[in-house]
Structure formats: structure tokens, C-alpha cells
Image: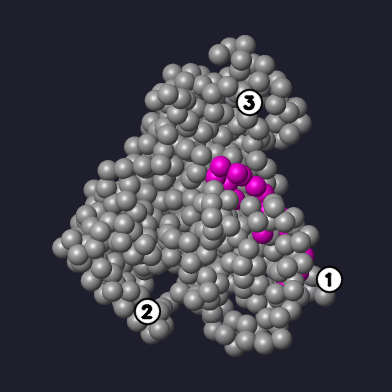
């Protein structure tokens, strides 16, 4: 994985010292909260419903054991003993005292971590596929180009004050696990007819109050031209993006208003001007330098079949369930990808205690080349585990309540913090996710239902990505009472779709029963073991709407 050079470290250390002075001035009353707000946002500090919140960047979701142990330390010393992993592959602490934030940032800097550009109208943390470097169908490790973009975009003078926040995601496989089509820019690594690797570019995706799927504006951008092409997009957005209305400021609105053809024309014109200068032509030696940080680990030569694994699956039913749902195919024989669910039955999606972080760090160090990943679905991944070690990993995880066998199943939910933490929320997300988890706790039933993604947001800002859940739940306020609107048929993969609203919203007391009715309807009409999303695409919304409003 990437390691800071002296420039990275100096940059982060200087930012910590600068923010320490700003915090000191705020605490002394020398600057007001309004004056302090843009300064704290530049350093990932939000003011939530009850306390400040600190958002820590995890570039393209990759962490070392050393870094995870530092996060555990921060949670234990400065917070309430836990952290919350987000849909942007970041980690948030919900209860830090403002006076402690400079010390937290100093501790993070000691392990090459920071909170820079995790908020504000700038290019945010670049996200990617949690299976990067391990996926069998991968054309190229997407973390390489993600790191190049991170270096290019950090403190970029033109793009530090964009019309609105800006998010970029990169995928290296045909199976999109990075949700690139709901980002401001989505990058798909592709191969052209000559066998050359380049990039397919999507622009204008996003959720929130106006959900939109990104539009493709280029089939193939050569490697050496990527930064120039991205800069062209950002320049067009910076020139024409709305600054007079926060609700119309994202690039998705610009693409929608001028049309994808005009957006493409403007970008190509700007790109041609940038090419004339040649200053953003990416040098191969720099690409090679960064590629070297992402070389494959020292795999052993192993048979793909593991006798130890096969025996353990037959001997332990719970382990067999875990292997079925939480273990994915690796590109190297004898290895597997292990997904760690942060969604225990009745738990808070994405929360991880400091003790659990320490345990995962130990497991990653021993069994997965000292590296782990954060997923955009609020789970963790060990990318390189020997099949013969799977049972030992399972036992170690189980000892810390981390062996829930539900990846991709109905209890593996995405949920934002909602009204329990967020000042913008209209309704609670966490208690609802817990109730749904408890209703569908039976593991046999979960496997019978099969793949089904439920996403819950506490407000229209859609931090829980409800628009792209197979079942999406949006908390709304009706005269001071919490209601929940349900959508069906959303997806955030290579067939990205925005879900359809089924009808009137449900009360807090009705909504879990409504989910039960949707699931029962699906089971009754599916064919040949179809997934929920396949059934929905085949039959549409009407059967679900009929059963919902006959019952509720």
C-alpha cells in the first residue's frame, strides 16, 4: 500500500499545526462559530446534533493494521470507544471534544492519516473497490489511479472552492463494487481493441434530493491523459456550476440542465486546450513509482482446494453459512477474500468498537499481509487470506462478535446515523435498521431470501443511499411525526438504477411489517431462485404495491 513521502508528511504536519492554532483561537473566543466553520470543515470537523464529529479519510478504503490500531486508540482515548465506518470508505468519530481534535490529528499524522478534504466544497476522498488487487476479473488495480488522483487533487488551487462537494470513484472490474455511477465522476478501467488500458468516464451521478445516474462522456481516455481530462471536467464545472442555490450546485444539475452532449462538447474543448500545454501529461516514471506501492503480496504457491477448509465446512454449520455469504473468490489459487460484517443482529450498521478494531488489526497482520479494506457498504474486507486459514480467521472474528454471516443478505443494511446524531435528519435510521435486523435474524431464512440490499436514510440528503437500495427507506417528517417512504428496485452496481416510490409513507410502527410484506410477496412470485432485484425487474412495482396497501 502507499506510504507517505517527505512531502506528504510535511504537508499533513503543517496542517495539524495550523489547525491547532485555529482551535485555540476558537476556544478563546477570538473567532466566532461562523468564522470557525470553514476552517473546521477543511479539517473534517462537523458540528452534529449533540457534539462535534470528526471524519477521517481512508483513501480508496485501504488501511494497514498499524493505522487501524491508531483508530482504535483514538476511539478509546478521545471518544466513546468506537468509530463508525461510512459509505465513503471513511471513519467517523461522533463524540470528540473540540479541544482534543488537534491532538487526534497529530496522532493520526504519526501513522500517515489525516482528515483533509473529508468535507467542504472540494474533491473528497477518492473511493474504489474493496477487492482491488484481489478480484479475478480485474483489468488493473484501481488503487493506483486512485492514489494518482488523490495526489493531484489534494490542495489543488483551482478546485478548493468548487460550487459544491465533489466525489470520484474508480472501478477496475466489470462488476462495479464502487458505485461509480452515483458519483460526480465515475471511472471504469477498460481495455480498447489494441489491448491498451484506459478509462471510461461517467459524469453527473449523485443521490440527495435529486438522484441521478451518471452519464458516460468518454469511452476511452488514455492513461497519460487522465488528469488532463479530469481537470477539463472540473474546470467546466467550476465555470458553470450553480453557486446561487445550494440545492442546484452539484455537477449532476449542470449535466442535466445543459445536456450530456453539451457537457461532453465543453469538456472536450477544455481538454484540447490543456493538451496543448502538455503540463498534465502523466509521466510514465511517476505512474511506475506509484504502481510499485501496489505490487501483489508474497503469495505462496498453493492448491486451490483446501482439505482443512472442506473439513471445517462439513463439521461446523455456522462456519459453512459464513463461508457461503462472507467469503469471495480470489484471483490467486489457494486464497480467498474475506468480508467482515459490521452488521451484527440488533447492532448499529458500520459501528466498530476500539477493541474490535484492535482484534481485526491483529487478524489482518497474521492472516492477510497486514492490510484491510473499508467497503462502501460499511463493512471491512481482508483481501488476501489463505483458504487453509479461513477457519482460524472465522474463530478469531467470532471471539469478538465479528463473524455475522450476512454479507449481501437482508440484515447487511446500509444506514446513516439519522436523527440519533445528525442535525439535518428528519427521522431515526439506526433503530429502524436494528428492528429489521431482529425481524429477519434467522440465518436460514436470510439465505432463503437471498441477496437483498436494504438502505435507510434519515433525510433527503441520502447519506444512507436509500435511492439505490433494492429496498430503500427514507425518513420524512410529517408535522413532527416520523414517517418512512419506501422505494423498490434501486441498485448501485453496473446496472445502477434509482428506486421507484411505492406509495404513501408508513409510520414507525408500520414500516417493519411493510418490509415483511415486500419480502413475502417476492418469495411468492420469484422464479428459479431469482434475486429480489431480478424479480422486481421482471414484474415491476404493481404486485408489491397491491400487497402493501391491501395489508397496511
Closer to the camera, 337 or 124?
Answer: 124
Name the residue carrying label 3: 502
Residue drawn where x is 32% and y is 51% of the image: 47
User: As drawn, is 342 to the left or to the right of 127?
Assistant: left
Rendered position, 382 above or below 229: above
Magenta segment: 203-221
Q: How far apart, in angstroms, are the residues tagged by discs 2 and 1?
A: 42 Å
Precedes in sequence: disc 3 or disc 1: 1
Which residue bears the numbered disc 2? 11
Provide the residue designation for mark 1: 193
- Given contact means CB atoms under 8 Å apart, are the residues at marks 3 and 1 in contact? no
- Label 3's element? loop
- Tell me which numbered mark, 2 or 1, is placed earlier along the sequence: 2
Q: Position of residue 56 (x, y in %)?
A: 37, 60
State the image quarter where residue 329 is shown. bottom right
Front position among marks 3 and 1? 3
Circle nearer the viewer, 2 or 1:
2
SS at mark 1?
loop
Quadrant in which the C terminus is drawn: top right
Amino acid at each position: 500500500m502507499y506510504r507517505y513521502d517527505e512531502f506528504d508528511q510535511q504537508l499533513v504536519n503543517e496542517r495539524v499545526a495550523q489547525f491547532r492554532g485555529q482551535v485555540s483561537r476558537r476556544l478563546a473566543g477570538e473567532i466566532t462559530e461562523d468564522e470557525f466553520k470553514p476552517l473546521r470543515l477543511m479539517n473534517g470537523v462537523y458540528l452534529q446534533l449533540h457534539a462535534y464529529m470528526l471524519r477521517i479519510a481512508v483513501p480508496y478504503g485501504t488501511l494497514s493494521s498499524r493505522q487501524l490500531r491508531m483508530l482504535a486508540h483514538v476511539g478509546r482515548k478521545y471518544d466513546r470507544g468506537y468509530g463508525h465506518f461510512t459509505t465513503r470508505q471513511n471513519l467517523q468519530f461522533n463524540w470528540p471534544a473540540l479541544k482534543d481534535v488537534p491532538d487526534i490529528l497529530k496522532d493520526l499524522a504519526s501513522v500517515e492519516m489525516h482528515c483533509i478534504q473529508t468535507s467542504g466544497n472540494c474533491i473528497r476522498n477518492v473511493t474504489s473497490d474493496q477487492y482491488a488487487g484481489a478480484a479475478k476479473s480485474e483489468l488493473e488495480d484501481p488503487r493506483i489511479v486512485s492514489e494518482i488522483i488523490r495526489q493531484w487533487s489534494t490542495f489543488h488551487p483551482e478546485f478548493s472552492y468548487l460550487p459544491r462537494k465533489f466525489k470520484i470513484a474508480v472501478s477496475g472490474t466489470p462488476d462495479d463494487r464502487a458505485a461509480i455511477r452515483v458519483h460526480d465522476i465515475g471511472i471504469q478501467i477498460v481495455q480498447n481493441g489494441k489491448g491498451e488500458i484506459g478509462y471510461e468516464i461517467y459524469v453527473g451521478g449523485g443521490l440527495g434530493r435529486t438522484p441521478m445516474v451518471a452519464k458516460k462522456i468518454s469511452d476511452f481516455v488514455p492513461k497519460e491523459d487522465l488528469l488532463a481530462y479530469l481537470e477539463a471536467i472540473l474546470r467546466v464545472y467550476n465555470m458553470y456550476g450553480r453557486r446561487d442555490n445550494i440545492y442546484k450546485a452539484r455537477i449532476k444539475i449542470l449535466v442535466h440542465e445543459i445536456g450530456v452532449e453539451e457537457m461532453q462538447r465543453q469538456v472536450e474543448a477544455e481538454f484540447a486546450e490543456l493538451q496543448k500545454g502538455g503540463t498534465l501529461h502523466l509521466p510514465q516514471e511517476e505512474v511506475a513509482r506509484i504502481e510499485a506501492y501496489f505490487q501483489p503480496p508474497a503469495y505462496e504457491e498453493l492448491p486451490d482446494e483446501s482439505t482443512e477448509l472442506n473439513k471445517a465446512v462439513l463439521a461446523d454449520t455456522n462456519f459453512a453459512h459464513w463461508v457461503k455469504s462472507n467469503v469471495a473468490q480470489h484471483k490467486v489459487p489457494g486464497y480467498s477474500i474475506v468480508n467482515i460484517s459490521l452488521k451484527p443482529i440488533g447492532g448499529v450498521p458500520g459501528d466498530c468498537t476500539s477493541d474490535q478494531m484492535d482484534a481485526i488489526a491483529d487478524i489482518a497482520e497474521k492472516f492477510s499481509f497486514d492490510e484491510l479494506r473499508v467497503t462502501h457498504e460499511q463493512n471491512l474486507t481482508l483481501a488476501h487470506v489463505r483458504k487453509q486459514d479461513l477457519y482460524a480467521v472465522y474463530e478469531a472474528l467470532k471471539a469478538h462478535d465479528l463473524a455475522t454471516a450476512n454479507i449481501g443478505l437482508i440484515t447487511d443494511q446500509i444506514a446513516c446515523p439519522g436523527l440519533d446524531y445528525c442535525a439535518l435528519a428528519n427521522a431515526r435510521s439506526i433503530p429502524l435498521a436494528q428492528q429489521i435486523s431482529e425481524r429477519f435474524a434467522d440465518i436460514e431464512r436470510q439465505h432463503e431470501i437471498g441477496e437483498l440490499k436494504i438502505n435507510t436514510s434519515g433525510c433527503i440528503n441520502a447519506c444512507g443511499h436509500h435511492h439505490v437500495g433494492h429496498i430503500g427507506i427514507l425518513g420524512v417528517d410529517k408535522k413532527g411525526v416520523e414517517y418512512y417512504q419506501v422505494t423498490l428496485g434501486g441498485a448501485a452496481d453496473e446496472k445502477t438504477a434509482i428506486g421507484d416510490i411505492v406509495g404513501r409513507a408508513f409510520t414507525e410502527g408500520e414500516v417493519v411489517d411493510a418490509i415483511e410484506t415486500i419480502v413475502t410477496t417476492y418469495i411468492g412470485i420469484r422464479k428459479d431462485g431469482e434475486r429480489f432485484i431480478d424479480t422486481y425487474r421482471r414484474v415491476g412495482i404493481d404486485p408489491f404495491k397491491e400487497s402493501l396497501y391491501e395489508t397496511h
